[in-house]
Amino acid sequence: MADVWKQLAHYRKVKALPSGKRLLLRPLTKGDRQGLVDLFARATQQDLEYFRDDAGDPAVVGSWVDNLDLQNVFPLVAIVDDKIVGDATLHFRKRYHRHLAWVRIFLDQAYRRQGIGTLMLRSLIEIARRLDLQQLYTEVVTTQGRTIKAFQSMGFQQEVTLSDYFLTSNDELLDMAVMALRLVDRSGEF
């Protein structure tokens, strides 16, 4: 497994965007601190509302880089013109959850609907398979229908809806969809 982690530290994908610019997907490094802070500084308040942590706080985002441990959280960044425009992460679990990871994706608004999010999600799935994970999970507020459909198009299925699970800054309660992608077929096992 040590060889897999070494390979993943050098993971790269390149994509031509509709604009003709090139996108590079690679793991986050310690040198990306300011670029990641800048990405989340460009986020709207509405986007920031959906993060578990205060991604609008440069100290919080900086701590993600300062405490970088690819075997705990594997972050891929999307880069265009030397600027980070997206961040996609696999959050690993330990002990009895060591066979699964949680997926989170954020993309700069100016780079949405260009296939970048799909490439990022496909890459996370590929990485999860290399790591012999069996399941991926994500949480999506049910009012984000496009996001739910994007995950479904990649094979994720809605497992459960948690009623009144998410409280907005305006004190509105929203339902949360927990979605899963099974990477291993266990349908024939007892």
Image: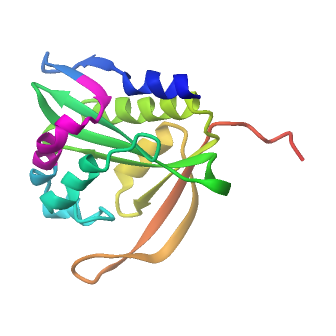
**Is 83 positioned to the left or the right of 9 in the image?**
left
The image quadrant that residue 25 belongs to is top left
- Total labels: the figure holds 0
Q: Is residue 30 magenta?
A: yes
Query: In the image, is residue 153 above or below residue 53?
Result: above
Q: Is residue 183 magenta?
A: no
The segment highlighted magenta reads: 24-39
The image quadrant that residue 82 belongs to is top left
**Is 156 positioned to the left or the right of 107 in the image?**
right
Q: Name the magenta segment's main secondary structure.
A: helix
Q: Where is residue 72 drawn, in percent x and y? A: 45, 47
Q: Where is residue 111 drawn, in percent x and y? A: 18, 36
Q: Where is residue 176 drawn, in percent x and y? A: 45, 67
Q: Is residue 96 visible?
A: yes
Q: Looking at this view, is 6 or 188 the one in front?
A: 6
Rendered image coloring scheme:
rainbow
Give the position of the N terminus as an image quadrant: top right
Q: Residue at x 9, y 24 (%)?
A: 81
Q: Is residue 112 visible?
A: no
Q: Where is residue 17 drawn, in percent x and y? A: 20, 21
Q: Residue at x 49, y 44 (%)?
A: 152
**Is 71 positioned to the left or the right of 132 in the image?**
left
Q: Residue at x 22, y 78 (%)?
A: 169
Residue found at the very far right of the displayed protein: 190
Q: Residue at x 28, y 17 (%)?
A: 14
Query: In the image, is residue 145 above or below residue 8?
Result: below
